[in-house]
Image (tube, rainbow, N blue to C red):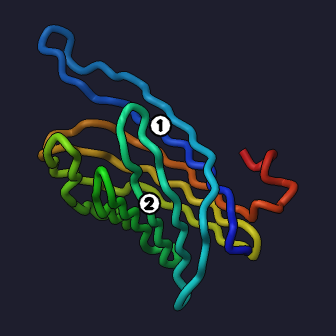
Amino acid sequence: MTKDVLVSISGKHIDIMEDPTRGYETGDDSIEVVTPANYYCKNGKHYIIYDEVLEGMAGTIRNKIKITGTESIEIMKSGVSSSHMIFEKNKKNQTYYRTPYGQLLIGVNTKNMEVCVDDDRINVRLDYELDVNHEPLADCRIKLDVMSKDDPDFTVMN
């Protein structure tokens, strides 16, 4: 894979909110981002680095994704907001998510992780439960696709 890549990240959060009059209800939030990134492989680990611009805020967030085989995926954010989320199948990990408004304790319980690495493409699927300050918040799904900017198939990868 080349150093210059395009990353497609789509995420879906199904919120779990308790309403005392109706029990549980859910809301569905989906996002999708396609952005240029840098890629490199070192000691068998794959790294994808890109900057994220926030609407209505000055500054950016530097994102670094580290893929270690099929066992572990780390997403490290630094800048306006920062965190270090670790995804390991059937394991719960916690981290602090720092924002300009304060910090939150985030828990990610990875239910499923699929990693496919080819010579010219990386595809990742993550299913996890998200909690904030030990309270269940959402069931989440992330789809991450990485390929060379020059690859003519990029437009059909989604």
Which residue is at the far right? 152
Q: CA distance from mark 2 to mark 1?
A: 19 Å
Residue ID at (43%, 25%): 28
Picture quarter containing residue 118?
bottom right
- Horizontally, residue 103 falls left or right of residue 88, namely left
Residue ID at (28%, 57%): 82
Going from N to C along the chain, the mark reached first, 2 or 1, is: 1
- Horizontally, residue 132 falls left or right of residue 117, namely left
Disc 1 residue crowd, few under 14, some 14–19, many 20+, Cα 10 Å: some
Q: Amino acid at mark 2?
A: Asn
Q: Residue tagged by mark 2?
A: 63
Q: Amino acid at mark 1?
A: Lys
Which residue is at the far front? 58
Residue 3 spot, x, y in % from top left: 68, 74
Q: Residue tagged by mark 1?
A: 12
Q: Is residue 89 visible?
A: no
Q: Is residue 155 visible?
A: yes
Residue ID at (48%, 77%): 68
